[in-house]
Image (cartoon, rainbow, N blue to C red):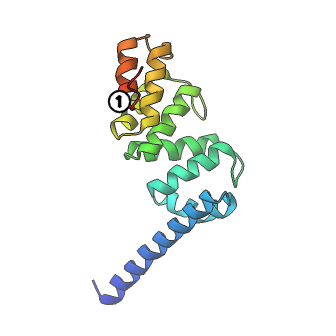
């Protein structure tokens, strides 16, 4: 590889990093149209953080017309590649039937994957699902186990 080619690749990577940082900052500042413009090309190239945020914006119509199909596509792709927040988000989609069919078994599976990565919200949701028998047979021992895992010692 020539030095010029290496420099071009390095410049392209740093430009993508800058776009990602700027896109996340715009997302956090609720400048969703700007975030969409910056993150969409990165999501199309497979950037997990960009896919996750694009999924949220597409799901909720932030900076674009709501697009449940696109939201599901990006959330599922990021979840399958191991992004814990996307796994949690996909689990909620399955639990609530948003952007996809309601599927409590898949919800449990994805919440467990996110919980395995340490997401307390997923642990707590699993505990509540087992406590209430929502999508799973009621199981108070399993509920207590998930509450403890989430840091709630008194349940």
Q: Is residue 40 at all visible to an observer of this figure?
A: yes
Q: Where does residue 35 sit, x and y in percent of width and height?
A: 62, 61
Is residue 73 shown above or below 134? below
Q: What residue is shown at x 50% (from left), y 44% (from top)?
A: 75
Is residue 134 shown above or below 86? above
The one nearer the camera, 22 or 58, is 22
Q: Quadrant of residue 152?
A: top left
Q: Where does residue 87 sit, x and y in percent of width and height?
A: 44, 39
Q: Where does residue 104 sit, x and y in percent of width and height?
A: 49, 22
Q: What residue is shown at x 63% (from left), y 47% (from top)?
A: 58
Q: What residue is shown at x 38% (from left), y 79% (from top)?
A: 10
Q: Name the residue carrying label 1.
A: 149
Q: What residue is shown at x 48% (from left), y 21% (from top)?
A: 128
The one nearer the camera, 151 or 11, is 151
Q: Quadrant of residue 97?
A: top right
The one nearer the camera, 73 or 87, is 87
Q: Is residue 107 at all visible to an observer of this figure?
A: no
Is residue 136 shown above or below 48? above
Which residue is the extreme one toward the front? 154
Q: Secondary structure at mark 1?
A: helix
Q: Where does residue 110 sit, x and y in percent of width and height?
A: 42, 32
The quadrant of the rendering that contains the C terminus is top left
């Amino acid at each position: 590889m020539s030095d010029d080619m290496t420099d071009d690749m390095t410049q392209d990577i740093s430009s993508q990093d800058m776009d990602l940082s700027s896109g996340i900052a715009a997302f956090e500042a609720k400048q969703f149209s700007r975030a969409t413009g910056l993150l969409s090309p990165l999501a199309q190239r497979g950037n997990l953080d960009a896919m996750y945020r694009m999924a949220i914006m597409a799901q909720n119509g932030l900076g674009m017309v709501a697009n449940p199909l696109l939201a599901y596509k990006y959330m599922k792709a990021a979840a399958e590649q191991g992004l814990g927040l996307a796994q949690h988000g996909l689990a909620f989609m399955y639990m609530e039937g948003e952007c996809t069919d309601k599927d409590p078994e898949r919800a449990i599976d994805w919440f467990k994957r996110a919980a395995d990565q340490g997401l307390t919200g997923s642990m707590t949701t699993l505990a509540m699902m087992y406590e209430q028998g929502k999508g799973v047979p009621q199981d108070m021992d399993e509920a207590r186990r998930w509450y403890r895992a989430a840091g709630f010692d008194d349940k």
